[in-house]
Amino acid sequence: MKMRMPSVPLITVDPYFSVWSRDEINRRWPVHWTGSRNAILGTVTVDGETFRFLGGGEGEAIEQKSLDIDAVSTTAVFANEKIELTARFLSPLLVTDLYYASRPVSYLELNWKSLDGAEHDVRAKVSVSEELVLNRAGEGRACSRDVSLANGSCVRMGSGTQKVLWRSGDDVRIDWGYLYLAVRGAAETGNEVFEDLYAVYAETELRPSALFAFGYDDISSLVYFGEPVKAYWKKDGRTIEQAMDEALSDYEEISARCEEFSREMLGEAERKGGEKYAEILALAYRQVMAAHKLALDPEGNVLYISKECFSNGCAATVDLTYPSAPLYLRYNTELLRGMLRPMLKYARSDEWEFDFAPHDVGQYPLLNGQVYGGNRLEYQMPVEESGNILIVVAAMCERDGNADFAAENMDLLDRWSRYLDRYGLDPENQLCTDDFAGHLAHNVNLTIKAAMGMAGYAKILARLGRADEAKQAEAKSREFAESMLRRAVNGDGSFCLAFDRPDTFSLKYNAVWDLLWGTKLFPESFYAGELARYRREALPYGVPLDNREKYTKSDWEMWVACFGSREDFEFVSDLLWRAYDTMRTRVPLTDWYYADTSEQRGFQHRTAQGGLFMRLMF
């Protein structure tokens, strides 16, 4: 990894079980993705002398020689005059395997070798503080007890007051359930205090290696329309003790699978987009996966719930599902269906009274109905969300080669297509997902979205044998596209931000589906004109979202980067790589930043970074 990573993933499981670090992992305390401290202390004792390899505080740190990541693991190498110590953190979030995408266990493997040719007595100790089981230290009391495992030694810790799923929010952490710290084989476990924090620890000899595992049982994961539901990994009655035992025994197997997945994914990224693009995806993958929770609804259907991190904490947000879709279209469409099921259920409820799609289904982890805008009409995103869902469902049909999921939901898809038919040609003053500089009427991007939504709807209808209606929907999509091309063109061949704002520009990211599907709604001259304008408007760290501000969105940049040649793609992706490489804000990847300075504008750890994977769809 040549990039200076803005933040380094260590333990990445879900929106609550999340531990990140700066690039020198033994100089500062690890943090939750929100930036709140999640103190974990790792030490190695060599011939009686103790050094810190993870965390902050007092005491001597062993020198960190290197730090590297792939899609699912982070590896740091340390050394002094006696030994070299390698620490590998692995979160086996395999998007292709629902069980491992859900199992709440992450690993730390330690290995050492002698550098001076002598034999050494080497021990390792990992201590996990109460900050991982409380919202903040001091908010309640943590307690612990030993746990019996067949394959190792284990201790658990949790809040003494267990109020499961008692609140929702954005900048909050879990304070229910139990954290498990285990070591494969024999080890000493117990509790202690460091930095005035209650903690549990596990300590063992390194001969020459040891395997630690961190697990978290949240008891119940979500409230789903008034009913608590459990994580997917529990579907066969598996307990957390069984999951921890299994994790200790299957490490080598799952590690090899993870290495193969990462090698193939990053290899494809490098072939299609270059080395820097591959590094961006390596850093984005675990973030996107761990900003979701994989659970089952009461009928046994998959739920894959996003949290709108550092925005408002909304759950199952449609305009986050839309940008995140490329990762899941490429690897596992069942997870996309899991994103859409809550919204489709809610849209059929008596509470949702509108003829367009909702924005969200609650505030994480409570999915009891939309919270955004208090369901007031002026805060809705009608063309945005209706178009998003039609496009995503159509893309799933194309990827799966069938329209089974669409067929189950045609009552809603038909309704939302009628909304686009009526309002998509020239949208009124309404919100859309890129209105950070203020929403506006006559938004060209919304008309493009409506055109692609109708094109996707036509594809769905064709697969369902509704040929005449498919032709009508396709004709409507072309009507929208042709109208946009006439009314929005600038003198330089690019296209404006809004129909009544000549000589402006914006990133026309929604048009990427036209290229992906080969619908040819927009001519080559449209893409050439847009790309030429993006090059002229480019700043040192990216292309602005539109002419109103100097900030941009990483997901939309990577979508418009697909408009042209490999050279065009690398021009844009290299700017994004440079932004992350130089960003002073040390947080998990932000998708909203200033293209002139690379400074974070807002958001971090959002699932929108699944949009960075769009190039893999071509």
Image (cartoon, grey):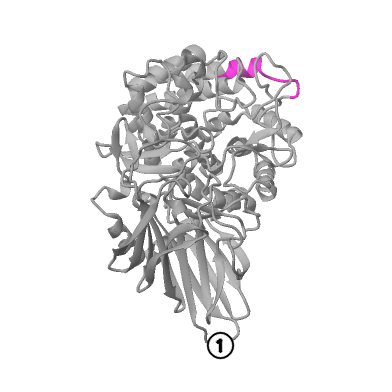
Nearer-the-camera pick, 452 or 359: 359
What quarter of the picture does the C terminus occupy?
A: top right
Q: Which residue is mark 1?
A: 118
Q: Image check: 2 left or right of 15?
A: right
Question: Relative to residue 612, is residue 432 depicted above or below?
Answer: above
Question: Relative to residue 403, is residue 413 depicted above or below?
Answer: above
What quarter of the picture does the N terminus occupy?
A: bottom right
* Position of residue 429 measured from the top left corner of the image (x, y, whole percent): 57, 14
Is residue 440 among what the camera can see?
A: yes
Q: Would you identify the image quadrant in which residue 82 lies?
A: bottom right
Nearer-the-camera pick, 196 or 173: 196
Q: Residue at x 35, y 32 (%)?
A: 341
Q: Image check: 337 left or right of 514?
A: left
Q: Would you identify the image quadrant in which residue 426 lies?
A: top right
**Amino acid marked by disc 1:** Ala
Is residue 216 among what the camera can see?
A: no
Where disc 1 sits, the SS reads: loop
Provide the residue span drawn in magenta: 481-492
Question: Relative to residue 426, is residue 245 depicted above or below?
Answer: below
Q: Residues within 10 Å of mark 1 (few under 14, many from 20)?
A: few
* Position of residue 305 measured from the top left corner of the image (x, y, whole percent): 40, 38
Q: Residue at x 62, y 76 (%)?
A: 80
- Count of marks, rendered view: 1
* Position of residue 239 measured from the top left corner of the image (x, y, whole percent): 27, 54
| Magenta span includes 490 | yes
Q: Residue at x 47, y 15 (%)?
A: 377
Question: Relative to residue 40, is residue 175 depicted above or below?
Answer: above
